[in-house]
Image (cartoon, rainbow, N blue to C red):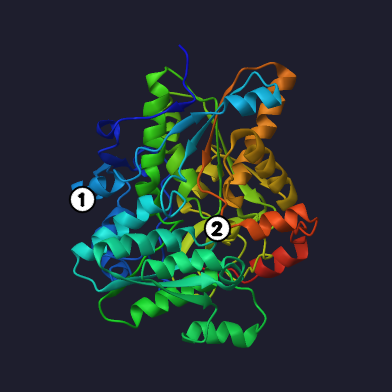
Amino acid sequence: MDVPYKIYLSEDQMPRAWYNLRADMKNKPAPLLNPATGKPMTKQELCGVFCEELVEQELNDSTPYYSIPQAIRDFYRMYRPSPLVRAYCLEEKLQTPAHIYYKYEGNNSSGSHKLNSAIAQAYYAKAQGLKGVTTETGAGQWGTALSMACSYLGLDCQVYMVKVSYEQKPFRREIMRTFGASVTPSPSDTTQVGRAILEANPDTTGSLGCAISEAVEAALSQPGYRYVLGSVLNQVLLHQSVIGLEAKTALDLYRIKPDLIIGCAGGGSNLGGLIAPFMGEKLRGESDCRFIAVEPASCPSLTRGVFAYDFADTGRVCPLARMYTLGSGFIPAPNHAGGLRYHGMSPILSQLYHDGYLEARAVEQRAVFQAAEYFARVEGILPAPESAHAIRAAIDEALVCRQTGEAKNILFGLTGTGYFDMVAYQRFHDGEMTDSVPSDEELAASLASLPRL
């Protein structure tokens, strides 16, 4: 059966329910712990920080499907279903027998997959009668998505943006402001935790861990506000399952079974969403698909971190999560894949990796941009630096197929566009881009501060 360049689903084929991967996991992700007591966080404790319905989704590891509210499905229709693309041109240029597919999530105003969870979290905040939400953002895709969702629903949106990205990507910042959000470079002097971080390290370029701390403090200090997060949490991976559910529906139309699924990994939202239904099949013994998480060598939480309870934020005000981590105080080099600079990994993905269901590899920045440039020239889409990590691995795996002669089906996630990353592309083209890999000594120093339980 011939496969078209782009497989478009109809609106009626868009998922009506999110898939909760945890329901099929034999080893469930460990519970979040209260840092003061060392005991699992209760629903009541979490509701002080998160919206009530989102807490229910966060804690429920047995319900396999959650119905998507009609208001959210109506919003999704603006940009979903997103296309599944057969990369014929890339296959031809690589001279590979592999069949390469990518799920393209860049066809909305936020430029990434982040809108899938942003509208869900904003919807539940509005339904609870809240005034607004606070959040952090790294490269800016999540902040953009949340500001767009909040604008649509009439909620206030306060964004703490990692300082290096705030400076590198002013136009991403201005999109957030266009949608009505306030954007503050983090760490800042507007919060107690921000001032403490600046006092300890005045020249810091910031991290997602820093920005999370500030956003949580801002939410707790304002009545009628809650904190929302764009990755890592179980609830976020639940919402992002629409990516994988659509991809599976499209592949099933042509009776295609993926042999290998690849995604970039920072906190885990896009990778977790893409692989969800396919991983469910593997957990149930229905397939033997391989899954690869691709992370930056400058922030290698899976490949060089440890599986342990750690703070989700630098300021140590958030609950403890059992995940692969480099230590909550780890400040990665200011590479251009801002969305992949988190010190830890989703507890769901961490557990899957720990149990051997998920592979991981770390790649260096210049190799990533080589792949990004090649893909742009061949497929005509300028990828975000984050997505280019998946492209790098997909190309490498396709070249292995060229050597072995195996016609594997490779699926990867193209999670965003790179049009606000031109400073990075400029530095790559001018030969000014460098690779940064933390030393064993640097990682050991950061991991030495892990909480002792």
Residue at (54% x, 87% y) in the render: 195
Which residue extends farthest top?
Answer: 1
Callout 1: SS? helix
The disc labelled 1 sits on which kind of residue?
A: Ala
Q: Which of 310/220 is in front? A: 220
Which residue extends farthest right?
Answer: 431
Question: Residue 336 at x, y = what percent?
Answer: 64, 59
**Which quadrant would the N terminus be assigned to in this image?**
top left
Above or below, 335 against 354 in this view is below
Q: Residues within 10 Å of mark 1 (few under 14, many from 20)?
A: few
Distance in Å between CA atoms under marks 2 and 1: 28 Å
Question: Residue 354 at x, y = what percent?
Answer: 55, 45
Q: Is residue 311 visible?
A: no
Counting residues from the N terminus, which is met first, the one under dot 2 or under dot 1? 1
Q: Is residue 99 visible?
A: yes
Question: Residue 442 at x, y = what percent?
Answer: 73, 66
Tell how many labels. 2
Q: Which quadrant would residue 37 be assigned to in this image?
A: bottom left
Q: Which of 379/339 is in front? A: 379
Q: Which quadrant would residue 282 be assigned to in this image?
A: top left
For mark 2, what is the residue?
Answer: 339
Callout 2: SS? helix
Label for residue 71? 1
